Image (cartoon, rainbow, N blue to C red):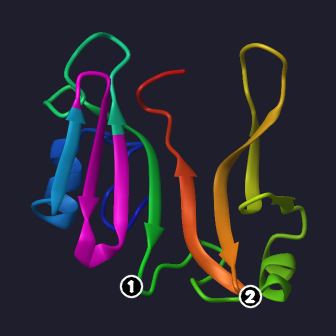
């Protein structure tokens, strides 16, 4: 879940609007729609690989980034601004990446098997600056 938005139950843009209100911006259409809620520090990428407009009713949440001043936290209690020590204590299997940490990993099911971040933490200047989430409702 991302706040009140529960993409495992309903990954559609309409459900995100119910959870967060009208977005600050909506860019794209076709295969990719980037929707931003500035007051929450939230961006969700909606996609539809079936040829439908991803900014329309058939757009499905694929990825999200949460940042900003909101008190976002993970289910284990990691908060924006916290340091590497806190990451390591809450996520001992976290892996460093060029932009931060892969907190929870998955294995790509196609091509050469390789890990990807189901949930990541962007890290800069000594603290967590954002959480990234792979939702994957639009398919592969």
Left or right: 53 as drawn, with respect to 64: left
Left or right? Give the position of 108 relative to 13: right
Q: Nearer the viewer, residue 62 or 126?
A: 126
Q: Is residue 6 visible?
A: no
Examine the structure image and report whether residue 110 is included in the region drawn in magenta.
Answer: no
Q: Position of residue 117 (x, y in %)?
A: 70, 48
Q: Residue at x 37, y 43 (%)?
A: 45
Label 1 vs 2, first from the N-terminus: 1
Check if mark 1's residue and mark 2's residue have beta carbons within 8 Å: no
Main SS of residues in magenta:
strand
- Residue identifier under label 1: 70
Residue 118 appears in the figure: yes
Residue, disc 2: 126
Q: Nearer the viewer, mark 1 or mark 2?
A: 2
* Residue 42 falls inside the magenta stretch: yes
Tag 2: Cα neighbours inside 10 Å, few (<14), some, or many (≥20)? few
Q: Which residues are magenta?
A: 29-45
């Amino acid at each position: 879940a991302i706040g009140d938005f529960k993409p495992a139950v309903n990954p559609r843009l309409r459900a995100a609007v119910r959870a967060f209100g009208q977005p600050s911006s909506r860019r794209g259409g076709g295969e990719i729609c980037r929707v931003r809620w500035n007051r929450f520090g939230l961006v969700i990428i909606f996609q539809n690989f079936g040829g439908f407009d991803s900014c329309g009713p058939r757009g499905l949440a694929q990825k999200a980034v949460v940042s900003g001043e909101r008190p976002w936290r993970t289910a284990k209690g990691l908060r924006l601004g916290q340091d590497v020590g806190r990451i390591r204590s809450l996520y001992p299997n976290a892996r460093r990446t060029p932009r931060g940490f892969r907190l929870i990993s998955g294995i790509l099911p196609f091509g050469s098997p390789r890990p990807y971040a189901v949930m990541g933490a962007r890290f800069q200047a000594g603290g967590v600056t954002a959480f990234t989430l792979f939702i994957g409702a639009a398919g592969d």
